[in-house]
Structure formats: structure tokens, C-alpha cells
Image (cartoon, rainbow, N blue to C red):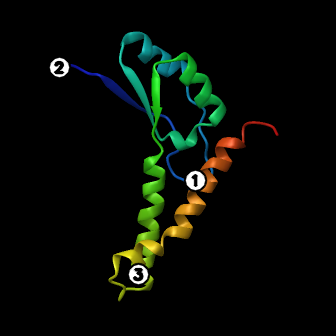
């Protein structure tokens, strides 16, 4: 059957992490030149919107995964909620207690994409 997509890990991946990563374009271009499959960037949270737009238009990169960063935030928030309210059993109430953290994580992600630390202004 063969390979039809190739995942690459370049980004920061953690919403709570202030580190943003510029993609090493020479590295993924070398992979791109050696294969004809679509490329997926794992840890896409750490890549600026500007660079994602640029490489999406000029490369075989077809997707930037950001789910890991959001799942990490949800996992931490669930752990805290269950530790603080160990008697809580209603799944809706448990998930509701993670809402503020999830909203903050998403807002932080979009803010960092709009204003990466390596971009003046």
C-alpha cells in the first residue's frame, strides 16, 4: 500500500509554553524533495500564522495539527477539577469546570499566531 502522508514534528505543542518555533524550511523541503506524499506538521501551535500561510501555499504541507496543545490543556484542567472536587461525579459538571481553561488556551493560541514574539509589531 505504501505511505500516503508523512507527519513532521516542528512546533511547540504546548499552549502553556511561551516558546514559538519557526519551521526549518530547509529540513522539510529536503523531505518534500525526497517523496511525493503530503506533509503534516505536528505541534502546529508553535508556528506563526504568517509562516503557515507561506508554506501552505508553496509546499506539500497540507495540515498543521494543534490538537495536542488543546488536549494537554484539557487534561491538566480535568486533573485539577477532579482533585479539587473529588466528590464530583456528573460528567457535564466536570467538563463545565474545564471551560474557562479551554477558552483561555484557544484565545492564547490565536493571539500568539497573530503576534509571534519573533515578529516586530
Asked if the residue under mark 1 is in contact with the one under mark 3, i.e. CB atoms within 8 Å, the reply is no
111 relative to 57 in the view: left or right: right
- Measured as percent of width and height from the top left, residue 66 is found at 48, 44
16 relative to 89 in the view: left or right: right
Q: Secondary structure at mark 3?
A: helix
- The residue sitting at the top extreme is 33
Disc 3/disc 1 C-alpha distance (Å): 23 Å
Give residue 121's quadrant in the image. top right
Residue 53 visible in the displayed image: yes
**Disc 2 residue crowd, few under 14, some 14–19, many 20+, Cα 10 Å:** few
Q: Residue at x 45, y 26 (%)?
A: 62
- Measured as percent of width and height from the top left, residue 35 is found at 36, 13
Give the label on residue 73, or none. none
Give the label on residue 1, or none. 2
Between disc 1 and disc 2, whose residue precedes? 2
Q: Secondary structure at mark 1?
A: loop
- Measured as percent of width and height from the top left, residue 30 is found at 46, 14
Q: Is residue 19 above or below residue 40?
A: below
Which residue is label 1 attached to?
Answer: 17
Give residue 108's quadrant in the image. bottom right
Between disc 3 and disc 2, whose residue precedes? 2
- Give the camera-side residue of 33 and 5: 5
Amino acid at each position: 500500500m505504501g505511505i500516503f502522508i508523512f507527519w513532521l514534528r516542528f512546533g511547540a505543542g504546548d499552549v502553556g509554553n511561551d516558546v514559538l518555533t519557526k519551521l526549518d524550511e530547509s529540513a522539510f523541503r529536503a523531505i518534500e524533495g525526497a517523496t511525493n506524499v503530503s506533509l503534516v506538521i505536528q505541534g502546529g501551535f508553535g508556528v506563526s500564522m504568517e509562516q503557515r500561510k507561506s508554506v501552505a501555499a508553496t509546499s506539500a504541507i497540507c495540515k498543521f495539527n494543534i490538537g495536542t496543545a488543546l488536549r494537554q490543556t484539557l487534561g491538566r484542567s480535568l486533573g485539577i477539577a477532579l482533585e479539587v472536587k473529588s466528590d464530583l461525579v456528573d460528567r457535564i459538571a466536570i467538563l463545565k469546570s474545564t471551560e474557562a481553561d479551554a477558552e483561555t488556551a484557544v484565545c492564547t493560541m490565536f493571539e500568539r499566531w497573530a503576534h509571534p514574539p519573533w515578529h516586530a509589531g
